Amino acid sequence: MTTADDFTLLWLQAGSCGGCTMSVLERGGAGWLEELRRFRIRLLWHPSLSEETGAEARAILGRVERGEEKLDALLIEGSVLRGPEGTGRFDMLAGTGRSMFDWVRTLAPRADYCVAVGSCAAFGGVPAGAPDPTDACGLQFSANEIGGALGADFRSRAGLPVVNISGCAPHPGWIMETLAALALRRFTGADIDAFGRPRLFADHLAHHGCSRNEFYEFKASAEDVSERGCLMEHLGCKATQAVGDCNQRAWNGGGSCTQAGSTCIACTSPGFEATRGFHHTPKIGGIPVGLPLDMPKAWFVALAALSKSATPARVRENARSDRVTRGPAPSAEKKTGAEKKR
Amino acid sequence: MSRVVVGPFNRVEGDLELTLDIEDGVVREARVSASLYRGFEQLLLGRPAEDALVIAPRVCGICSVSQSLAAAAVLRAAQGTEPARNGLIATNLAHAAENIADHLTHFYVFFMPDFARAAYAERRWHDAAQTRFKAASGSALREALPARARLLETMGLIAGKWPHSLAFRSGGVTRALALGDEMRLFALLADFRGFLERVLFAAPLEQIIALDSADALERFAEGDRAAGDFAFFVRIGRDLRLERIGRGPGLLMSSGAYLCPEGHFLPAGLLDARTGALRPPPLQAVEEDVSHSFMRDTAGDPARAETLPDIHRPGAYSFAKAPRLEGRAVEVGALARQAVAGHPLIRDLLARQGASNVFARIVARLLEIALLTQAMDEWARSLRRRERFCTPDAPLRDGDFAGFVEAARGALGHWASYRGGEIARYQIIAPTTWNFSPRDASGQPGPLESALQGLEVGGEGASSVALQHIVRSFDPCMVCTAH
């Protein structure tokens, strides 16, 4: 059933909430485990899924550690907790007497690819927020600073830095598509961005394809939660600054944060946890501090003023409502055009 | 006497370690350890009160909606807001979807695979169990995981995504469902019901909900409609006498689940499993003990307590604190909820053993899947499309507030103190903090610790399958436990 050609995968949880595993379990028409098989990916062990427990699980880790079992990809979910005082004792791998900090540094050099699943493993994530009680970090980053648990110079056996599938939690597709590309040996150093994030999602902004785009264009903004308008001006939305194809693919069958009226908190970005007041847009002189990525401020201000003055009543009205109160009625002119055609 | 350390204890949520003292093939003492501490209660301090809606759900990616709702409940208490009726209903739909998904994951992914283990090779049902439930490859997973994903599309509609959504507010939810959304909800609920009635129960949900005694359950499981995975489990459970192992501490608590406009769908209560006495849970009498925790001494009252780790504390063996109700260890979870709500099947299963047990815990979870799926249908039909889904935030009052919800695994409480709109204190007691608590100052063990005491493991020691069943019957969530 299993052959030496199988792409082997070891998934371990460090300082994690388990949410990345929950996310990937949503994947696949016949379930994620079936999808793994279709790509000839073999799970050596996963804490939530494998039969082996206790001594049996320790034996698997031992074989990998000693190099007796080929390891194609090591996946780590959760922050690496280095505290207290560098001992890693805030996160011990049960039954082994060793910290996850230790296990991560031991196993990573054995793997062809080392993958951080989620923003915690990638950059430290929420546990690394102030006051950082556990000295949490990512595998190769602490927020946006290179280093982390493995160090800036770390390269896995295939010569890649840590692949950071960021997101809190990441889309199941981001995880599985990255794994599939690795297993098919079609994933190269050119496929990650400067923060190690797979470009298959990181080449986009969460803003792209947002269902609130018309409100954004006209700067017709929501002022209270549950209103349909753009969430950027008042409610803290960072979708124009955060990477992710969040609004170009369906979450849980068809949603996304902004579609549900929830502010984008930039959960794919290093250090997103440092924000205070996630639901309020900080402003100076009435202008949001965080402007769209790579957009000159003067242009933004000029365009915003212009588009605000051009906002149709329909858009202005719907922006402050929790549902569409006025639909896009065809104008008299267009009706005439259609009639002429006939 | 020999001491064995068991870990990593997997197919639970998070990292669990057990230490067992075994003498003459019997567990004399068990110590349960939560080996991960991330410090969420420290991370919340000094933040704007509302930021708890972002931070708190990230305690747990398995029950993130429950964590969101507890955080929202505390804010609601401090704001004095009245949530929108539709908001409560949409919240309950999302919360029920999460809780059903958790129960389903527990049954198919965590619990049943142990019956496919080689240790049961001699049992007549073993071949079938192996085909159906083998970990990571059993045929059931090809049906259960897609059904779970389909059910979680409820989150796409109501909450944008799962886990970790920002849709849940003190006044309701951030998205108003339109007519098309309602229809999509009906369609996915019908699909999910189809999976349950074809695969898990192989019977109408109504027939499962109407099971009113252990005898009725047995007749169901032996009868000609007994094709489903539920009946298969019941037959295995009877064969292995799972009702004889994993006895709980005797007290079962629910803090009240699914707040509807007319009150809780499942009521709050504290039930004595031995006597059947039922009373309201004195939640103001909850205290946490740290005598065996890697924590500094602090107030017992969660409203005044702090969480400051101390890895060097003598005698400590877990990052979890030990919550007690009027000084006693308490079991929480689906079994407690259904026992408190008075479901006749569950009451009968408890009465026959005089205590909670492995078999009753699994049955209660599956029964709850049926009950909640039916409730979701009714809730979806009770949405009033022209009404609001969210009331606006009201100004936050400073003071000490608490909020309670029922996560899949049981009672979840958040206690917060706000000063100048910021969080001055925050304490979380999660379901598995109750169930897998360490000993307290009086030496009283936590519920799992006492459930393992006296277990005959024979020569198998730590590899005893019964041990696996008992631990997993609680469906522990270790990431919540110590947070």
Image (spheres, rainbow, N blue to C red):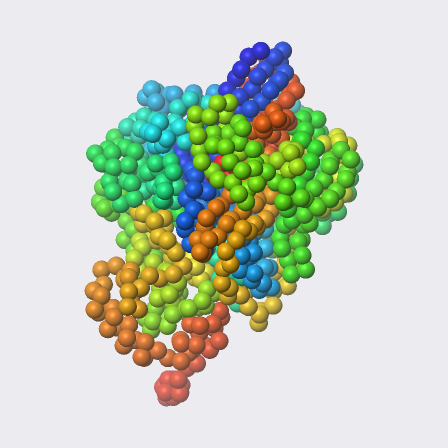
> Residue B76 in the image: x percent, y percent?
54, 57
Return the residue nearer the eye: B122 or B386: B386
> Residue A82 in the image: x percent, y percent?
34, 32
Q: In which image quadrant can residue A175 be found?
A: top left
Q: Is residue A114 left or right of residue B113?
A: left
Q: Is residue A171 left or right of residue B184?
A: left
Say if A314 sits above or below B269 in the image. Answer: below
> Residue B333 in the image: x percent, y percent?
62, 40
Say if B371 sits above or below A317 in the image. Answer: above
Q: In which image quadrant can residue A138 be found?
A: top left
Q: Residue at x 60, y 43 (%)?
A: B411
> Residue B73 in the image: x percent, y percent?
55, 54
Return the residue nearer the eye: B245 or B429: B429
Residue A168 in sight here: yes
Return the residue nearer the eye: B190 or B357: B357
Count the labels in the image: 0
Q: Quadrant of the N terminus of chain B?
A: top right
Q: Residue at x 38, y 70 (%)?
A: A221
Q: Is residue B437 left or right of residue B45?
A: right
Return the residue nearer the eye: A99 or A74: A99
Say if B444 sits above or below B303 in the image. Answer: above
Residue A77 in sight here: no
Q: Residue at x 30, y 44 (%)?
A: A143
Q: In which image quadrant can residue B32 be found?
A: top right
Q: Residue at x 53, y 24 (%)?
A: B18
